[in-house]
Amino acid sequence: MPKGIYKNNRLNIVGQTFERWNVIKFSHMDIKHRSMFLCKCNCGTERIVAGASLVNNISKSCGCLKRDTDKNKMLHNYTGERIGRLTVLEQNEYKLRRPH
């Protein structure tokens, strides 16, 4: 851990950025004595996140990072590529709909 990351036995990471999270302010200590912070994701979502999850690179975003990477995978044209025993013959142009 970098020197000066703790202040008064509490994780002090306010103002720092971890992946897509920007730490806004200290929120509270939870039941297990973990420092919890109010964070804002690059997409605009605000959530309370455990400081240890930020420092240890466990929490990277509110979920928008996974959605973005999944969307990029859908844009890739796999025509002609082998996936296991299968070969992709053509790309189907349809939109995925979320279940309601």
Image (cartoon, grey):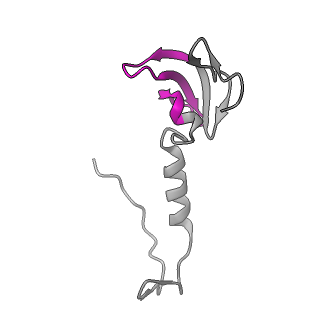
Q: What range is drawn magenta here?
A: 25-53
> Exactly how many numbered labels are in the figure?
0
Residue 29 is covered by the magenta coloring: yes
Question: Which residue is farthest left?
Answer: 100
Q: Nearer the viewer, residue 78 or 92?
A: 78
Look at the picture and state if 7 lies above or below 57. above
Rendered residue at 61%/39% (across/down): 20
Q: Nearer the viewer, residue 81 or 25?
A: 25
**Quadrant assignment, res 55:** top right
Q: Nearer the viewer, residue 66 or 44?
A: 66
Look at the picture and state if 17 lies above or below 74. above
Image position, residue 75 (x, y; %): 55, 66
Image quarter of the N terminus: top right
Rendered residue at 35%/52% (across/down): 98
Q: Nearer the viewer, residue 29 or 16?
A: 29
Look at the picture and state if 5 lies above or below 74. above
**Quadrant assignment, res 2:** top right
Image position, residue 7 (x, y; %): 63, 14
Instruction: Say whether residue 81 is left or right of residue 16.
Output: left
Question: Which residue is farthest right?
Answer: 3
